[in-house]
Amino acid sequence: MVSVEVITSALEGEIELKFTQATASDEAGDPTIFSFGMGGLFDIGTTGISDESRKIVSEYFALHQNYPNPFNPVTTIAYDLPEAGDITVTILNILGQEVTKLVNGYQQAGVYRVVWDGRDNNGQAVNSGLYFYQIKSKKFMAAKKMILLK
């Protein structure tokens, strides 16, 4: 099943921005594709909105708390990269064993979000409990905890 929703946002009744948010699920109702929407920022001037978006770049490496937390069935993990590099974002169980790797490769500097659906590397749903998510790059490493409730 796929659902698509067009969301409209207005600024003081003058500017209307639209973006599409889509989600999909398999026959059991488990999400397989996650929400996405408009990215970047638009410059708003006296002549209107420019069509070139600016990429948001943080000054510092950061790993943010997942949301929602506790979660079921999906959670979003956000992180900031002030410079480009090889990045891994990994989900670990309470014993520190890898459950799944969400990101593994080169990324440009920017602000990122990745969604975890509570499945392991084999596509199997994991049990309720405490999990950790970890980000690693050449210059930065951080981890936070999250709770999956079913």
Image: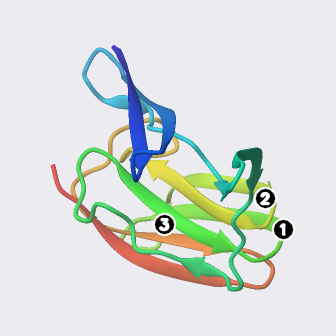
**Residue 87 appears at what percent x and percent y?**
73, 65
* Quadrant position of the N terminus in the picture: top left
What residue sits right under mark 3 in the picture?
Answer: 97
**Quadrant of the image occupied by residue 111:** bottom right
Instruction: Give the CA distance from mark 2 to mark 1.
Output: 6 Å
- The tag earlier along the polypeptide, 3 or 2, is 3
Name the secondary structure under disc 3.
loop
Graded by Cα atoms within 10 Å as few (under 14), some (14 to 19) or many (20 or more), the crowding at tag 1 reads some
Observer-nearest of 9 and 102: 9
At numbered mark 2, what does the secondary structure look like: helix, strand or loop?
strand
Type of amino acid under label 2: Gln
- Residue pointed to by mark 1: 85
Total numbered badges shown on the rendered structure = 3
Residue that appears at 84% across and 68% down: 84
66 left or right, relative to 108: left
* Amino acid identity at mark 1: Gly
Are the residues flagged by discs 2 and 1 in contact, CB closer than 8 Å? yes
Q: Earlier in the sequence, mark 2 or mark 1?
A: 1
Label 2: which residue? 107
Quadrant hosting residue 26: top left
